[in-house]
Image (tube, rainbow, N blue to C red):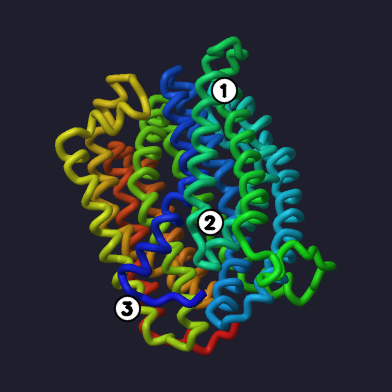
Amino acid sequence: MEVNTTYKSIFRISLPIIIGGMAQTAINVIDTAFLGRLNEITLGAAAIGGIFYLIFTLLCMGMAIGVQIIIARRTGENKSKDVGIVFDQGLYLMGLFSILLFLLMYFAGPQLMKQILTSDLVYEEVIRYLRIRNFGIFFVGMNMAYRALYVGLSKTNLLTYSTAFMAVVNIFLDYVLIFGNWGFPNMGIQGAALASVIAEVSAMVYFIIFTKIRLDLNSLSLYRFRKLSKDIIGSIVNLSYPSVFQNLISIGTWFMFFVIIEKTGERQLAISNVLRSNLMIFMLPVWGLATTANTMASNIIGQGKSGEVLKLSGRIIVISYIWTLLFLPLVLFEPQWLLSVITNDTSIVSEAIAPLRVIYSALFIFVPGVVLLHTVTGTGDTRTAFFIELASIAIYSVYVYNIAIVLGSSLEMVWTAEFVYWAIMAILSFIRLRGGKWKKIKV
């Protein structure tokens, strides 16, 4: 399926991606909203445990990006038979990668938490959460492979339905398992972990069933399950590994941000988790639009229209700004309402208002930063995207440490680090795209 850079085409492709991209974020926000009704310790532990698990989720996403880019390129070239070949090899790769990640999480996770966390109470809650949550990574790996297939094909409607289904499952199970409603056991933070794992399983089953129903398996040569191909897997890994490391340092640094916050106090950690959940809500549409930039850039390059890549990015940035502005009235006039969605602790809500407005302001730098970086990745120039992320992270980390630990600044000042991070990313990505060296890359 060929795409073009019109606003209509961008909307058609991006809206399901936006909704579909809510999958893991929705689970994190839903879990936090329910756990926010318990206590500060549990709320803070959910931040640490949730972001630790998110690291491995984004590693899966990074590994799947190669599958997505190649499928999008072959789709633009009208080579539909190659789609199934790439997808089958992608499933094998994601399965093996998920096993490796699970082993790392299961054996190294507790030791890492013991070394970096100050509060014993937070540590105990984090470990209780991860003992169950870790098992979800197997299903995340498969779900990312299917997501890469549908985004690469620009057939993104199924992502909407799968995410809605997973969210409903997660909300119901959070309600009954966290609080022990309707005769279910009262599991607290472990109930949130179990609910999330089951929701991920349900999404995988949904993908499998509806792929057989909705797609033409013969024309795409899907589900043939050929033997392992070193060449294809090598091509996927070659495109993906920079994104894997890019996601690792990106979310890993965010994880360390919360570890630094934890050292300033359990209450500051709880407030920051509420802010994190609101920030993820703000970012969701833009992340989906950035993913659209990624796959559409690869598709139009496959059509021989490299000259339209920057125009595509510009239009996606415009749409992202319009979407971001929709939150402005709430942030200015009803910030308490936004924060109370996550927690009913009025003192936490009150203290979170000022930093909430800081992180919302940073979105206006975030928009061009994330869209342009994903466009760089979509061109196949994944190594440069990695180095751009690395440079942004390095400066961001120094800034956070000095503001939070050395200077002991207020929470809203600590969150100004978002401005620094996204500004550097936007500038470097724009310079790379304008340079045009990516036009020589073969995928």
For residue 298, above or below residue 331: below
Secondary structure at numbered mark 1:
helix
186 vs 310, left or right, is right
Residue on which disc 2 sits:
249
Q: Nearer the viewer, residue 37 or 81?
A: 81
Q: Residue furthest left?
A: 333
Give the foreground label among 3 and 2: 3
Residue 290 appears at what percent x and percent y? 41, 62
The percent coordinates of residue 74 (x first, y second) are 59, 78
Which mark's residue is nearer the viewer, 2 or 1?
2
Q: Amino acid at mark 1?
A: Asp
Residue furthest to the right in view is 227
Residue at horizontal 62%, vertical 51%?
A: 210
C-alpha gap between disc 2 and disc 1: 26 Å
Position above or below: 189 against 184: below
Let me know if residue 145 appears in the view.
Answer: yes
| Circle 2: element type | helix
Going from N to C along the chain, the mark reached first, 3 or 2, is 2
Crowding near pointer 1: few (<14 within 10 Å), some, many (20+)?
A: few
The quadrant holding residue 86 is bottom right
Please name the residue that numbered disc 1 is placed on.
Answer: 120
Q: Amino acid at mark 2?
A: Ile
Q: Badge 3 is on which residue?
A: 311
Mark 3–mark 2 distance (CA, rounded to whole Å): 29 Å
Compared to 174, does 295 lie above or below?
below
Q: Amino acid at mark 3?
A: Lys
Please name which of the two marks, 1 or 3, marks the residue nearer to the observer: 3
Residue in the image at 63% along x and 76% along y: 80
Mark 3 lies on a secondary structure that is: helix
Q: Nearer the viewer, residue 167 or 347?
A: 167
Kindly identify the residue that appears in the image at 29 percent across and 49 percent down: 416
